[in-house]
Image: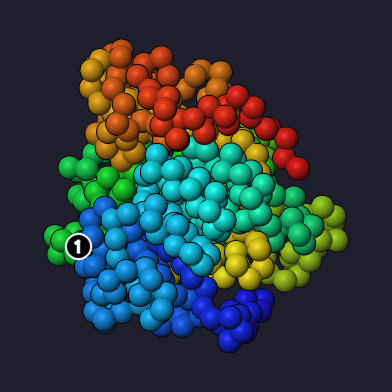
Amino acid sequence: MNLHDLLVRRAARSGPIKVGVIGVGKFASMFLTQVLNTPEVHVVGVADLDVDKARGAFARTGWPAERYSTSSFVQAIRTGGTYVTDAADDLIAVPGLEVVLEITGNPVAGAHHAERAIDAGRHVIMVNVEADCLLGPVLAEKAREAGVVYSMAYGDQPALINELVDWCRTVGFDVVAAGKGTKYLPEFTTSTPDTVWDHYGFTAEQVASGDFNPKMFNSFLDGTKSAIEMAAVANATGLLPQDEGLRFPPVDVDELATVLRPRAVGGQLTRGGTVEVISSVNRDGSELTRDLRWGVYVTFEARTDYAMRCFAEYGLRTDPSGRYGALYRPYHLIGLELGVSVASAVLRGEATGTPRAFLGDVMSVAKRDLRAGEILDGEGGYMVYGKLAPVGASLAGRALPIGLAGGFPLRNDVAAGAVLSYDDVDIDETVTAVKLRRQLESAPSNQFP
C-alpha cells in the first residue's frame, strides 16, 4: 500500500517512468487525462495508425498542444514531451523506454507488439484483452524468460477480479466464483454495429465525441467481451469455466452469495471455483434494484464454523446457510486506473494479474448463416460472437478462437448458431498471432501452479 510513495521516490532518484502507448481509443484517452497530472510518469510517445485521431485524443483530454507537438522521440526524451507517430515498432525501440501499453484491441496486432516489446526488454501492460485471451500464457512465459513483466491492465475488470480472488485466497477463503456484471439479454448475441447504440441508449452527441467504437461496444453487448474477459480471468486465477460457458444470470448484489454457489447447495453454478458474468437486467428487460452492471465480485466459502460466525457478527451478506459470502466493487474506472499497473510493473516487478495456465478459451459462433468466400469481420461485428468454453472443449472441437475470427476468408458455409472450426477458415500460418497460438495449443498447461 505504498505504491505512490515508491513512485515519488523513483522520480526523485532517476526521473519519471518512461511509457509508450500503442493504440489511442477510449481506454488510452482515459489514461492520458490522468497521466497529464502525474509527473512521475512520462509518456514518451504514442503510436496509432490514425495520427490525427491520436492528436485529437490529446486535445480532448486536456493536454496543451506544446506537450504533444515534439518532432521526434529524441526531442521527447530530452524535453519531457510526447511524440505522436504511426510507427509502433519505432516507439518500442526507443532507448530507455520502460513500459509498453498495448491498447489497440486488435489481437493480431497485439501479438506482434507484445512480442517485439518483450524482445526489446520492455514491460508489457496488455490492455488488449483480446490478445491476452488468444495467447496470453505464451506471452507471459516469454516475458518471464526475458525478465520483464507481462500484466493485465488495472482498472479493467479482469485485473480487478484477479485482485479480489487474490485477496480471497490470501486471507484463507475458498473461491466459489468470480466475475463481473454487464447488461445482457439472450437476443443481444445477434446485435451488430448498426443496432448497438439503440441498445445502449447513447445520444448522437455522445457517439460523435470520437471515443466510441461501434464494434468494440457491440462486443460488450453481444457477450463476446464478457467471454474474452472471463477466459483471461480463468487463465490468471486457475478458476475453471463451466462446461456451458457463461449463463449471465440476473443477480442483485444482495443475492450474490446465494445465487453464485454450486447447485448442490442451492445455487446456480454447475461447479465451484469458476467464473460467471451476471446481468443487470431480468430476462424481460426490467432492471434489477441493485445491479452490478459496472462492477466486479467474488463469492467465497468459510472454511471453519468460527469464520462463518464471524460473517454474521460483522454484518456480511451471506447465503441462507451463513457459510457463503461475497465481496464486490461496484465500479471500475478503466484507463483512469491504469497507472497502478505501470507503477507496479516498474517499481515492484509485479503484474496486476498475469496468465499462469491455459484453462479458458473463446470459440467463434456464427451470428447468421455464413457463406464460403466471405471475410470474417471479427469481434463485435456482423458475423460472429464469442462463447466461453473450458480449453479442453475448444481444442477437442478445433474451434476457431475469436481472436482469429477477423480478416480470414471462409472456405465453408457455416449455419447460424454453429461454432466455427479451423477447418472452416483459410488461416495464414505466417502471422505472428497464429504462430504463437499454435505454440499454445500444442502444449496446453492445465495445471495451475
Closer-to-camera residue (136/367):
136
Counting from the top left corner in percent of width and height, residue 147 is at 66, 54
One can see residue 147 in this view: yes
In the image, residue 398 sits, relative to residue 95, either above or below, namely above
Left of 334 or right of it: where is 123?
right
One can see residue 274 in this view: no
Residue 112, quarter of the rendered image:
top left
Counting from the top left corner in percent of width and height, residue 201 is at 22, 56
Counting from the top left corner in percent of width and height, residue 82 is at 34, 72
Image quadrant occupied by the C terminus: top right
In the image, residue 114 sits, relative to residue 95, either above or below, namely above
Closer-to-camera residue (26/42):
42
- Number of labelled discs? 1
Q: What's the residue at 30%, 19% (across, down)?
A: 410
In the image, residue 424 sits, relative to residue 343, either above or below, namely above
Residue 404, quarter of the rendered image:
top left
Residue 185, quarter of the rendered image:
top left
Image quadrant occupied by the N terminus: bottom right
Q: What's the residue at 41%, 36% (across, down)?
A: 403
Left of 52 or right of it: where is 185?
right
Closer-to-camera residue (349/218):
349
Q: What's the residue at 58%, 87% (across, down)?
A: 12
Left of 436 or right of it: where is 166?
right
Q: Amino acid at mark 1?
A: Asp
Counting from the top left corner in percent of width and height, residue 229 is at 49, 46
Residue on which the image places disc 1: 52
Q: What's the residue at 72%, 40% (across, down)?
A: 448
How crowded pointer 1 is (Cα within 10 Å; few <14, some 14-19, many 20+) is rated as: few
Query: Element at badge 1?
Result: helix
